[in-house]
Amino acid sequence: MKNLTPVEFWFVTGSQHLYGEAALKQVAENSKKVVEGLNGAGRLPLKIVFKKVLTTPEEIRQMCLDANTDAKCGGLVLWCHTFSPSKMWIGGLTQLRKPFLHLHTQFNADLPWSTIDMDFMNLNQAAHGDREAGFIHTRLRLNRKVVVGHWSDQEVQDRIGVWMRAAHAWADAQGARFARFGDNMRFVAVTDGDKVSAETKFGYAVNGYGVGDLVKVLNEVSDSAIGKLVAEYESTYDVAADLHKGGARHDSLRDGARQELGMRQFLEAGGFKGFTTTFEDLHGINQLPGLACQRLMADGYGFGGEGDWKTSALLRTMKVMANGLKGGTSFMEDYTYHLSSAGHLVLGSHMLEICPSIAEGKAGIEIHPLGIGGKADPVRLVFNAQTGPAINASIVDLGNRFRLIINEVDAITPPQPMPKLPVARAVWKCRPDFKTACASWIYGGGAHHTGYSYAVTVEHMRDSAEIANIELALIDADTRIADFQQNLRNNEVYYHLAPGLGRL
Ligand code: MN
């Protein structure tokens, strides 16, 4: 995946000096075994390293400060093998700027009923030690993920793994750069927003570039590089006959390759992790970039159409979380509906820019007219999307905060072929049902643009929202409109008051 740096996680065990050196040594050894067990299980996407058993306020503060400044540290996993008085943790945790997960586990799984004595009791104290820890986390209003169960439990490991992915995406966003070619689509509200708030909240920077800057790079792409990339297209996709070498429209495919190469070079040179385009600002570009955006998305770049930088950044976050998982992740738009009495469906698509990572089978490259933009016909990848459970995620700027809206959906095989539809598309059913989902989405102010994924789950998104400390509005199989609306109203109050409670 493009421009992605791995991180590792620090395993930190809380204790105190009350138990003597021998007990602390045992705590450290057991902690190492837990870490070895977690790494060795093969279910975590990233490495966890044992740091230390912390027993004093000074050590705790130093550990938190070290974590803040170590770019490789994606976050902390905290555990209290024994009791660790939590006033010791205030100085460190109030300084900690990295995400943390509170693992509520115990070294021993089964109680040794016939031999249990006070030595065992004094060593295996997470049952009350982690409650003391949980109190101070709550008292300090710290966002975190709490995972409960024995460390060998696969469900526990998987939940840690999900959080690691969210923390990795958070680390990826810190200092990330997003390029906007042109501005927002004129008059559109939901794709706009406060870039200063976003940078403060999420850590990524969004800046605009004149399309002329991009055109200059496009014009310098060599013919031989274009020829090579066209050959790659021919071997990877079903290329339409008129686009083949010698075909009447082969030059359009070469223009598409030029766009991909030029945009790729621009993004790599600038260290960007995502970008936006807009059909209203294409001066010097002869077709709206379709194929290029699709191929760049497939490499892990965030993308948003019509200047939609929030969705571009969200898509990058989702792609980082999905890295290495089965099932693709794409920019998406709720495009049109099938309102049949036999069941309502959504057809998701865009003018061009759907990521081929979600394609079912081999995609084709085709060329067709585009009704807007007043440019030459653009080349694009056309395909049906995979089937199966998926999510749609949208992030909106409500003026005083960001809200993440998620809908769980089930992608299906389109009921009939769509031979005349010249764009990639997905067809899905909404959970819990079309009417509830769409009404909730609209009450929540969810956008028409989304990040759409078969790999990223609600739990990934929930962990991501918890780390960023933003509102999450979930529409799933259990959603009822009245409750959903009431939650939105409650959240208006909560997010107004929360800064006063210590949460920014
Ligand atoms: Mn759009």
Image (cartoon, rainbow, N blue to C red):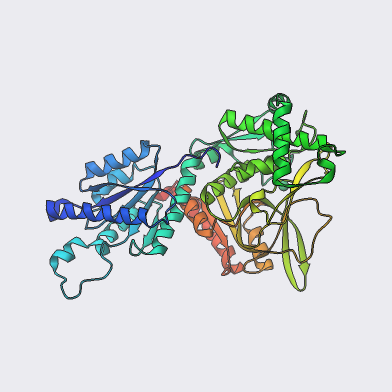
Q: Nearer the viewer, residue 443 or 33?
A: 33
Q: Position of residue 303 (x, y in %)?
A: 64, 42
Residue nearest the viewer, comparing 184 with 43: 43
Position of 231 with respect to 62 (left or right) is right
Residue 3 location (% of width, % of height): 53, 37
Residue 192 in view in this figure = no
Q: Indicate the position of residue 289 as horizontal and vertical percent values.
A: 74, 38
Q: Residue at x 53, y 46 (%)?
A: 320
Q: Is residue 113 visible?
A: yes
The residue that appears at 34% across and 53% down in the rendered structure is: 137
Query: Residue 344: percent from the left, percent from the top?
Result: 73, 68
**Residue 168 appears left or right of 90:** right
Q: Is 411 rendered above or below residue 314?
A: below
Q: Quadrant of the N terminus?
A: top right
Q: Which residue is painted at 74% across and 63% down in the image?
A: 414
Report which quarter residue 146 is drawn in: bottom left
Q: Is residue 56 above or below residue 376?
A: below
Left or right of 360: which side holds 5? left
Question: Could you say which is closer to the camera, residue 225 or residue 411?
Answer: 225
